[in-house]
Image: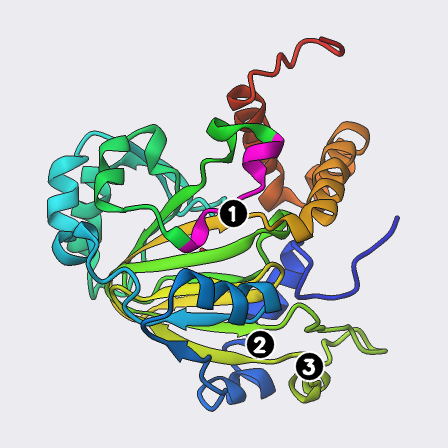
Amino acid sequence: MQTERNLLKRRDIDALKTVAAAFRSGPLAGLLDSAPELERRSGLTREEFEREYRFRGRPVVLDGYAADWPSVRHWTFQNLADRCADVPVVVDSYRSEAARLTTFGEFVTRLEASAGSGADPLYLQEWYYRTVAPELADDLPELDIAQYDFRRDLYGEAASTNHQLWIGQQGGITRLHQDAYSVDVMHAQIVGEKLWHIMGPGAELLPGPGGAAQLDALCASPDTRLMRFVLRPGDVLYLPALWFHRIELLSDSIGLGRKCLDQAHLGAHIRQRIGELLALALNPDELRVTHSELFDVVIARARALADRMDIDLSRLRQ
Ligand SMILES: O=C(O)CCC(=O)C(=O)O
């Protein structure tokens, strides 16, 4: 079997634990506070953004780009809970052992009740709110800089819709990852503050001869390109495809993720999708063991995609 050597890219439990620990102590953790700040710009037009950042694959924070959105000006946890009280949500979906189905109203009640209790922070990650609470979209206008999603051409409008809310409690963490399928990340901060650490697509954490992760080499390599920044309400992040990112909630926080497939990454995108589907079709038993955290999520995503694309999964040929 082919094994990914870069621990930053692996999704098996041991690799996830090694990378999570590296952010808590050791040489990488020692660098986090002094990492350079990512560039911030304000007042850019779409054309300037594309010329200076998107077409050059350079990440940037656009200060206050969404500052006048109704959500940024008016949303609170409580008024969202009033509007979405009975809407079903899966909280902590990134931790299989903690994931549970509840309602949005119950989630906010628990979040407020457990504040400061020392319990693990609650996090509603990657909430595709448009399928269950589409009215919220009125408060989250389209970003003019995020209108190039080539997945529309591949899968159709319905399947490519990709607006996710990230709603969580102070102290919540989204572990280091690259977004799958070579999509660019746009992230608008709506409520509260989040600390981001990012690393370039070439960052590598390899096991040494005795098996221990070579953290000093990661820290020393120019390809690591570790940077940090805080997103505040109204800020919008542009992170090109395959940049690694890890997020820590500095306060209770709401953010909106928008993903776009740049045509430049079409080949890589299709290769990853086909690779994943072939792995699921041809090697499911092994994948279930090696990727126990991911397996069900990937199946659920593939089913949702097929559904939105109107694909009949009981047939081999249409
Ligand atoms: O805000 C977070 O916790 C994670 C956001 C993220 O990973 C994304 O938008 O791609």
Location of mark 1 (residue): 148
Magenta span covers which residues?
A: 145-154
Residue 25 is marked as none
Residue 21, placed above or below residue 307: below
What's the residue type where badge 1 is placed? Tyr
* Residue at image point 88% right, 48% down: 1
Q: Nearer the viewer, mark 1 or mark 2?
A: 1
Does 194 appear in magenta?
A: no
> 109 or 250, which is in the foreground?
250
CA gap between label 1 and label 2 equals: 35 Å
Cα distance in 3D space between marks 3 and 1: 33 Å
Which element carries disc 1, helix, strand or loop? loop
Q: Position of residue 126 (x, y in %)?
A: 42, 46
Question: What element does badge 2 sit on?
Answer: helix
Give the residue type at disc 2. Ala
Residue linked to disc 2: 22
SS label for mark 3:
helix
Q: Does the image show residue 53?
A: no
At a point 56% along the width and 71% down the height, the residue shown is: 58
The residue lying toward the viewer, choosing from 113 and 240, is 240
